[in-house]
Image: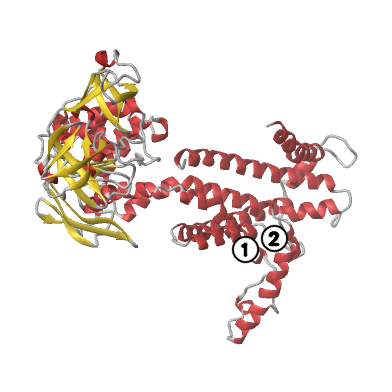
Amino acid sequence: MTELVDATRIAGPAPAGARVSLEGLVRTYGATRALNGFSLAIEPGEFVALLGPSGCGKTTALRVLAGFERLDSGRVTVDGRDVSKVSAQHRDMGMVFQSYSLFPNMNALNNVAFGLRMRRQHATQRRQKAGELLELVGLSDQASKYPHQMSGGQQQRVALARALAIEPRVLLLDEPLSALDAKVRAELRDQIRQLQQRLAITTVFVTHDQEEALSMADRVCVMSAGRAEQTATPAALYSRPTTSFVAEFVGVSSRVPVESENGSVVLFGERCRIRASDVGLPDGPLDALLRPEDVTITPDETAKPFVTHKSFLGAITRVIVQVEGVAVRVDVRSDVAADIELGARVRVAVVSRDVLVAQRTATRPGSTQ
Amino acid sequence: MAPFSIYSFLGLGVPIIAVIYYAFQSEQGKPTLSNIALVTHGSYLLGFENSIVLALITSIVPGIIGLILAYAIATSRSATLKRLVATASGVLANFGGINLTFMFIATLGSTGILTAWLSAIHLNPWNFGFNLYSFYGVALVYLYFQVPLMVLVITPALGGLRPSWREAAENMGASSWGYWRYVGVPVLMPSVLGGMLLLFGSGFAAYATAETLTAGTVTLAPIQIGSLLAGNQLAGQENVGYAVGLGMFVVLAVTMILYGLVRRRASKWLR
């Protein structure tokens, strides 16, 4: 990874990031409601990821925050000031686009200096600061290169330096890594996070890649149908999803049909409590949502479940077990899994007696997500 | 590659070699520089000057009109309008010669329909110094195919201007003026210049429209070649015609080299 220079030396002492509040945002395109009462509060200096499937409204929310989209209703405040009617030109927010969007007629240095030029900074000052920012992102040797002469990763780092040049109060990242290959993506992911932490800029990051969101953000807001499903720390989101949508969208889950009765279900022969958030569901047929690490298997010649598939993932191996016609994913240490043959009979058990359940889907019960 | 090379050689290479060969040959078939000396003076030089001025006028004016028109269409939300204009431009850009001349004579000639209508409201352009059969009349008629040609050439370049460039500029505090000044215009400039150079070539080399409209009364290089090769002025002057043709070839070659250079830059920026 590119060695980072001291960010505070260039950008000065870390400014207090702005407090951002999105309140009841509604944005419609014809009959489509891209944002349907979306709300989110972001603390100063916080890194929040908007995560969701295509069409969930995450990019629209970011564009509303940037000032590129008008609102049908709701409001956007920055440090308590309503900026809903303020144009993008005057919002003081730096944005990094998915497609880099560097100006093709300018070299890297002039791209970075563009915002300073618009702020009428003296040429010497802006060149010096642009040079320092290129150094910050590890591209000081590329200052005279034009965008078409740089790789995708280099272009995106220049775009990041350009967004930081104006010392924005809020940094907006619109799927900045999605056009890059895996290795560069991983490098730039670390670099963005380190820079954000050093500069303490309030940052909103849009992505459909849950690994990116969970590894980079302080908090992740999972969106669905123009609304926030759950906003929580990555750990809480993964281990304590409050809705079945979040449980299935974040991480891997297996759906196992169960019958609920008085707040409990029987799972693999053991009685388990239904997690508090789903207690309101009526008694009757439901699906339990199980993470691969929530299930254990033990070889047992007398058991009915059997192994149908194994995927080596490094330290662990993901094993798929057929339990009464239902495919259940189980994570097993690879050294243990090596001794388990395909077709082997295994006994299945749950780690926790506290399970998340969801309405039974109309699709084939027991399918894995 | 090979079929194209053969096609280019037969279509361009052989005629050029022939033009060069005969331009340096006397009527008696002996090598000479007299043809070249002749066409760089007097009426032949005037023909080149007029052709270059006509080409400049009919590249800059339609270039600007075509750019504005193409921008209006490119930013329109109507896909039907875009398709319609693209098709119409394709047809009109190739509409010249006798048909176009007749259309203008019937419309704006001294007894044309539009002239008659304008006369009825006391705005007969011929009473204000307009003459369709003059140098500027030719320039006006050329607009008819030059504007659509510019629309055809510049529309892809306008489509290559990414909306996110504008948003990025706005995001960094640029006004609309700031965006166009520092990004939009510089990025488009090679394509606009390229389009105008194509128009220059088209206006410089056009023959039939000018010939049929003015019957050779306006001194233009292509018309002079036509007259010389047909023996309309003096018999046995064909080789002088080839020398004028060589001069035109040199002007067009310079135009195409410049066009290649600006296209190279445009293609880097508007990929």
User: How far apart, in angstroms, are the residues tagged by discs 1 and 2?
Assistant: 8 Å
Q: Quadrant of residue A203?
A: top left
Residue occupied by mark 1:
B144
Residue at the limit of the structure toward the front, as seen here: A302
- Residue A306 is situated, as x and y percent measured from the top left of the image, at 31, 24
Whether residue A169 is visible here, answered yes or no, is no
Mark 1 surroundings within 10 Å by alpha-carbon count, few (fewer than 14), some (14 through 19), many (20 or more): some
Colouring scheme applied when the structure was drawn: secondary structure
Circle 1/circle 2 CB separation < 8 Å: yes
Rendered image quadrant of residue B92: bottom right
Residue at coordinates 57% horizontally, 54% vertically from top-left?
A: B152
* Above/below status of B227 relative to B121: above
Is residue B112 placed above or below A335 in the rendered structure? below
Name the secondary structure under disc 1. helix
Where does the image place residue B163, in percent across and percent down from the top left?
A: 38, 50
Would you identify the image quadrant in which residue A209 lies?
top left
Residue A157 coordinates in the image, percent (x, y): 29, 32
Residue underneath mark 2: B96
Q: Nearer the viewer, residue A20 or B253?
A: A20
Mark found first going from the N terminus, 1 or 2 = 2
Towards the viewer: A182 or A8: A182
> Dot 1 falls on which chain?
B
Chain ID for label 2? B
Q: Residue at x 69, y 51 (%)?
A: B205
Residue type, mark 2 in image = Gly
Which residue type carries mark 1? Tyr
Q: Where residue A337 sits: x, y (%)? A: 27, 16
